[in-house]
Amino acid sequence: METHVKTFMTGSPIAIGAGESALGALDLMIEHGIRHLPVIDSDRRVVGVLSFDDLRAAFPQPIERNRPPGPEERYEMRDISVGEVMTYAPLTATAHTPLDDAAALLAERRIGCLPVLDESGRLDGIITETDLLQALVTLLWVQRKERGAAVEPPRARTSLLDALQSERAHIAERLASYEAHEQEITERRREGPLDRAEEGAEATEAGFTHELAELAVRRLRGLEHAIERAESGKLGHCEACGGRIPAARLRALPGTTLCIRCARRNETGA
């Protein structure tokens, strides 16, 4: 099996210019569920790399990968540009770079990705830590198979609908266990009086279980709404503008019906 970067890299990656807003870069990362952006010039030559950690260190407010900042937070972040916080002149690879060389660079330099350049030095792809972990899984499977071991092939990436349905089944199972646990607590109280320490422990345990159950119910509602939209062919389409809602946003917020731009407009009233 070919063990070069080309086999496992992500081609035609999302990129951004150095003069663009760092806040816009954060929006791209949240919208597409990514942690790194190659920074390119007008000729698609790589001039830097911007990571989520770079943004986390630069912004005055805490940021999260699955939640766009609110209006007040955005106001404080508005003046920071990509060029101010990116890593300049990053290490790069080509499609023909051996995979182990790419992995060694990431490990030695403690970095999360390598932009991949084509023969003219322009951006061709990106290889990340996640890509390398997928490569490791695949290569170990090939080795075991060559030794004659009976092994299952690496799992293909599941579709969004499959992932949502699987999560729904898992949460429904967990919710049933929470409800059964609450019933056990109620039965223990009926069996006889508890001393003060036991009563306090029971109350704490019951409160924690109830809180988990509420979170599970909320998530389950979002998943069921997303699955209903999928069955009617509406999943992934913004109700406001008709544009695409990326899978990463739907995995984080399955009940959403708005793309990140329309959701922001709703927040600001613009």
Image: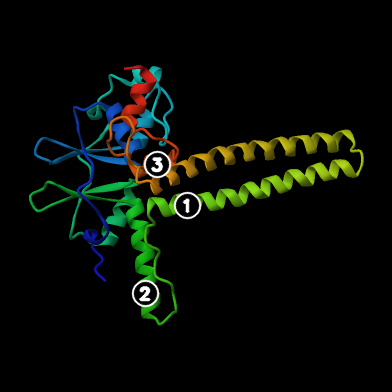
Tell which circle, 3 or 2, labels the residue nearer the N-terminal end: 2
Label 3 vs 1, first from the N-terminus: 1
* Labels 3 and 2 touching (C-beta < 8 A): no
Q: Nearer the viewer, residue 61 or 231?
A: 231
Q: Which mark is residue 143?
A: 2
Residue 241 visible to an observer of this rendering: yes
User: Mark 3: which secondary structure?
Assistant: helix
Q: Which mark is residue 165?
A: 1
User: Could you tell which of marks 2 and 1 lies nearer the N-terminus?
Assistant: 2
- How many tags in the picture? 3
Q: Nearer the viewer, residue 9 or 216?
A: 216
**What quarter of the picture does the C terminus occupy?**
top left
Which percent across, then down, holds residue 57? 38, 30
Report the quarter where the N terminus lies: bottom left
Judge depth for marks 2 and 1 and give the one in front: 1
Circle 2/circle 1 CB separation < 8 Å: no
Picture coordinates of residue 157, whole percent (x, y): 37, 58
Position of 204 with respect to 152 (left or right) is: right
Q: Secondary structure at mark 2?
A: helix
Report helix, strand or loop for mark 1: helix
Residue ID for mark 3: 250
